Amino acid sequence: MKEIIAVLCDIRSVHNVGSIFRTADAAGISKIYLCGITPAPIDRFRRFRSDFAKVSLGAERYVAWEQVASAARLLGRLKREGYLICAVEQSAKSISYLSLKPQRGKIALVFGNEVRGLPRALLKRADRILEIPMRGALVRHAGHPRHTGRGKESMNVAVAFGIIVYHFLRLRLAVARLRRDEVRHMSESGNRFACAIRRYPRTNPP
């Protein structure tokens, strides 16, 4: 899936990141940025990590990735490069991911820490803030900073990544289908016009 990248901000679990790489490879994500404490597929000796590969199944060898110290500076650069920044987080300004319309341009999907999520400073840089509607039992986690109201407040970040990425894949396929329909319509219109000219050729006045 060209022109769609992922930005992982301070994700702690190597298993979550490995699972995200595996899903990204399956969906065709073009690149993953690893920000802050997010674990990389290689250790400090530049060797591939076995605990990472056990979950990713080697996807890190095929999906482009890069470690970045500052997520804020990265999002600023991506925005200047024309990316639509879509943060996945529960917020007062968030909308359901299901309400997002097909997008034709470049997209950066941003995911945050398993417990704290994305900080406000990064949410302010987002063009869209998306959330996955939750249903089920009340989450009783005293340390959860967004523990309000009814319904589950979060799900595993790797699971959320899969839901969001494949939704964007579906939207991209819808855009591609729309383009094909537009081209076919233009071609059919041109053919009808050509047939009309052959059937009723222009005649010069006497």
Image (spheres, rainbow, N blue to C red):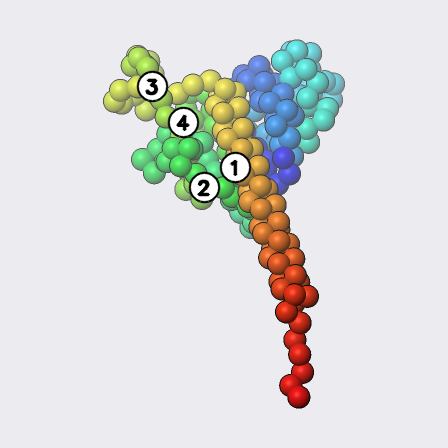
What amino acid is at disc 2? Lys
Q: Which residue is mark 1?
A: 171
Q: Secondary structure at mark 2?
A: loop
Residue type at the position of mark 4: Ile
Residue beneath the point at 73% across and 24% down = 61
Distance from Cα at disc 2 to Cα at disc 1 = 7 Å
Q: State the residue at coordinates (50%, 31%).
A: 167
Task: Identify the image quadrant of residue 138.
Answer: top left
Amino acid bearing label 1:
Leu
Q: Are marks 3 and 1 in contact (CB under 8 Å)?
A: no
Q: Point out the residue furthest to the left here.
A: 149
Q: Position of residue 72 (x, y in %)?
A: 51, 40
User: Relative to residue 90, is residue 175 drawn left or right?
Assistant: right
- Determine crowd level at label 3: few under 14, some 14-19, many 20+ residues with C-alpha closer than 10 A: few
Where residue 176 sits: x, y (%)?
Answer: 59, 42
Q: Which residue is mark 3?
A: 135
- Is residue 81 among what the camera can see? no
Mark 4 falls on what kind of element?
Answer: loop
Residue behind mark 4: 132
Looking at the rendered structure, the kind of residue marked 3 is Arg
